[in-house]
Amino acid sequence: MSEIRISKDIYYIGANDRDIDFFEGQYIVPNGISYNSYLIKDEKNVVMDTIDKSKVEEWNEKLEKALDGETVDYLVVSHLEPDHAYNVEFLAKKFPNMKIIGNAKTFAFMPQFFNIEDLEARKIVVKEGDTINIGKHTLQFFMAPMVHWPEVMVTYEQSEKILFSADGFGKFGALDVDEEWDCEARRYYFNIVGKYGDQVQSLLKKASTLDIKMICPLHGPILKENLEHYINLYDIWSSYKPENTDGVFIACASIYGNTLEAANKMAEILKDEGVKKVTVTDLVREDMAEAIEDAFRYDKIILASSTYNMGIFPPMHQLLMHLKGKNYQNRKIGIIENGTWAPNSGKCIKEILGEMKNITVVDPTVTIRTKMTEENIENMRYLAQEILK
């Protein structure tokens, strides 16, 4: 097993998971995911988070190899979610003199996960800005509540200027996958963290006061170069600003294909109007997490849905509920509805959008009765012109 060093004194002891099918029971991860964990060796040795249940054996081997016979003095628990903290109790038993570093929320939640009998004597409760010196390295702690659990905190190592960012700046995909960071980090952000933009903004303000040379997240690659790019994207995403203002996202929920045909026609019309990028997603068949990502990525959206039981066809309703739950806002939206005898999905969509912040619904709603007609196409052209104003 090869040794991976972040720097002279900092070791990577995480693992790739290529066997996982759904992350958190709902997100497709075709290229797997990484569970990142780190060891800082100094006068005092510090483990930065542990590992998921599925990779305990590999993690233990890497830790033993990096320790080379030494002990663990401190465990920093940045986040109690089981994919990072599963081995906390094991480590506490293995190293009975090890202190556990967390914040007040960490230790309030910890008994729900572990039975550490002498926890009161072993815990070190840190608060905003506190520091712990371990020799050449000094750890400074900053609270990051709701990014994306209440107990989350990040750690800044002062001498090497490294930010251990918990789930912040994370990404789907194993570390041995060669793929663009932006796409899978965006899908990860909006689905895992997206609701808590204000809290991410607060964390970014704290980070702006630090001289950061490297970001070590709990998922995804370690970021060493062009940090401004990643931080700028996080600023855009957490401000609920669109990343793409020269494209249109069309989300479609079609029962028999007629509504999907209209959505594809709408894409053709938008391209004729000069739109540089039009993305059409079939919500019935394609990844919902990616649809959520695209809904946040673009500033102009078309929602095309069949009517179902006098309401919205369930795949579209599911998308809308996800967006509402993730604090979706600041977008222009056009609607195409379909129904044979009583088209009603448009009205129901508007009701849900009305519960969101700063959503502009663009008229006209295009109403199709089963199959698209020339009149529908003319109305779609008009809708395209209106949403592009």
Image: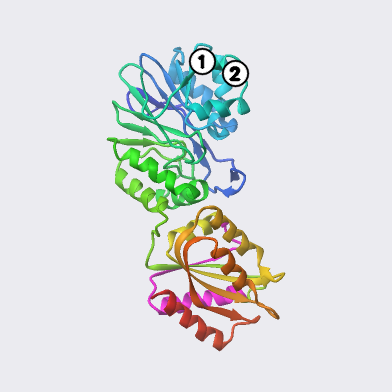
Magenta span of residues: 259-288
Determine the residue positioned at 33% across, 22% down. 138
Q: Nearer the viewer, residue 336 or 170?
A: 336
Label 2 Cα neighbours within 10 Å, binned few <14 / some 14-19 / many ≥20:
some
Asked whether residue 86 appears in the rendered view, the answer is: no
Within the magenta stretch, is there residue 274?
A: yes
Determine the residue positioned at 57% across, 33% down. 82
Percent coordinates x, y for residue 326 in the rendering: 52, 52
Percent coordinates x, y for residue 264 in the rendering: 53, 74
Q: State how many labels appear.
A: 2
Within the magenta stretch, is there residue 134?
A: no
Q: Secondary structure at mark 2?
A: loop
In the image, residue 357 above or below residue 252: above
Q: Nearer the viewer, residue 261 or 82?
A: 82
Mark 1 or mark 2, earlier in chain: 2
Q: In the image, which disc is placed on residue 122?
A: 1
Percent coordinates x, y for residue 114 in the rendering: 61, 24
Q: CA distance from mark 1 to mark 2?
A: 9 Å
Q: Secondary structure at mark 1?
A: helix
CB-based contact (under 8 Å), mark 1 and mark 2: yes
Residue found at the very far bottom of the displayed protein: 374
Residue linked to disc 2: 116
- Residue type for callout 1: Arg
